[in-house]
Image: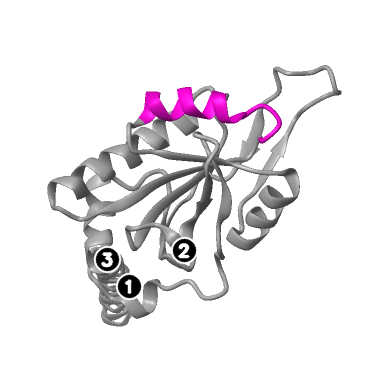
């Protein structure tokens, strides 16, 4: 009886070790692959689209006509108290890293709050974040269409017409897109500038 119990204990112990090893290996594989250049698995089919808006200099902007073939894109709003500035500064650092490697990318910001984010406001905001940042706005219809195309969540908590101190709850992904606006990869706000930079090099 003791022998059977002992065998069962070792069998259970062995099974536990196998499960732990398998789980650890899967995590290791996922982390290892996240830094690789497997383009086929990073292309997000059906997400994204053309971008034709107005920039902070009141100039018509078309993503398709930009000189750089890649753009790092972020949706937010200039009155955002904390998240947007933090994420955009991270993206600005990515831009600096790419410049050091002689890889030209567009650093793009699209407002989710076009009623307050005028071109004048966006000019001051873009100058604060990075000298190369392109800040874009448009009509409510244009912004809503882009939100749908890129799977972006954005909703204000505005109470009434007079309320100008409202916040906008929104998703916080950054998108790596080509000239057609097709999403090649996307990054959550925990991704480091170095990791994003390595991923961008895959598509250069």
198 horizontally vs 78: left or right: left
**Image quarter of the C terminus:** bottom left
**Disc 2: which residue:** 64
| Badge 3 element | helix
| Badge 1 element | helix
CA gap between label 1 and label 2 equals 49 Å
104 horizontally vs 78: left or right: left
**Disc 3: which residue:** 24
Nearer to me, 120 or 185 = 120
| CA neighbours of label 1 inside 10 A, class few (<14), some (14 to 19), many (20+) | few
182 horizontally vs 115: left or right: left
For the question of whether residue 80 can be seen, the reply is no
**Disc 1: which residue:** 19
The x and y percentages for residue 59 are 52, 42
CA gap between label 1 and label 3 equals 9 Å
Residue 88 sits in which quadrant? Answer: top left
Camera-side mark, 1 or 2: 2
| CA neighbours of label 2 inside 10 A, class few (<14), some (14 to 19), many (20+) | some
The x and y percentages for residue 126 are 43, 30
Q: Which of the numbered marks, if any, corresponds to residue 133?
A: none
Query: From what the image shows, is residue 45 above or below residue 126?
Result: below
Query: From what the image shows, is residue 137 above or below residue 71?
Result: above
Q: Are marks 1 and 2 in contact (CB under 8 Å)?
A: no
Q: Residue 48: within the magenta?
A: no
Span of residues in magenta: 114-129
Nearer to me, 139 or 96 = 139
């Amino acid at each position: 009886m003791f022998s059977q119990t002992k065998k069962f204990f070792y069998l259970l112990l062995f099974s536990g070790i196998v499960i732990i090893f398998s789980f650890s290996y899967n995590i290791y594989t996922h982390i290892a692959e996240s830094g690789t250049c497997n383009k086929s698995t990073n292309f997000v089919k059906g997400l994204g689209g053309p971008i034709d808006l107005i920039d902070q200099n009141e100039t018509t902007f078309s993503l398709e006509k930009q000189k750089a073939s890649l753009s790092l894109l972020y949706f937010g709003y200039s009155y955002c108290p904390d998240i947007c500035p933090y994420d955009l500064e991270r993206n600005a650092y990515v831009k600096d890293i790419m410049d050091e490697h002689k890889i030209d990318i567009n650093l793009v910001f699209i407002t989710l709050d076009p009623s307050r984010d005028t071109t004048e406001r966006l000019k001051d905001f873009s100058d604060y974040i990075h000298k190369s940042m392109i800040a874009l706005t448009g009509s409510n219809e244009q912004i809503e269409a882009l939100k749908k195309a890129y799977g972006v969540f954005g909703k204000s908590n505005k109470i009434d017409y007079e309320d100008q101190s409202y916040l906008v709850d929104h998703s916080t992904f950054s998108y790596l897109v080509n000239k057609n606006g097709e999403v090649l990869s996307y990054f959550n706000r925990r991704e480091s500038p170095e990791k994003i930079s390595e991923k961008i090099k895959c598509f250069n």
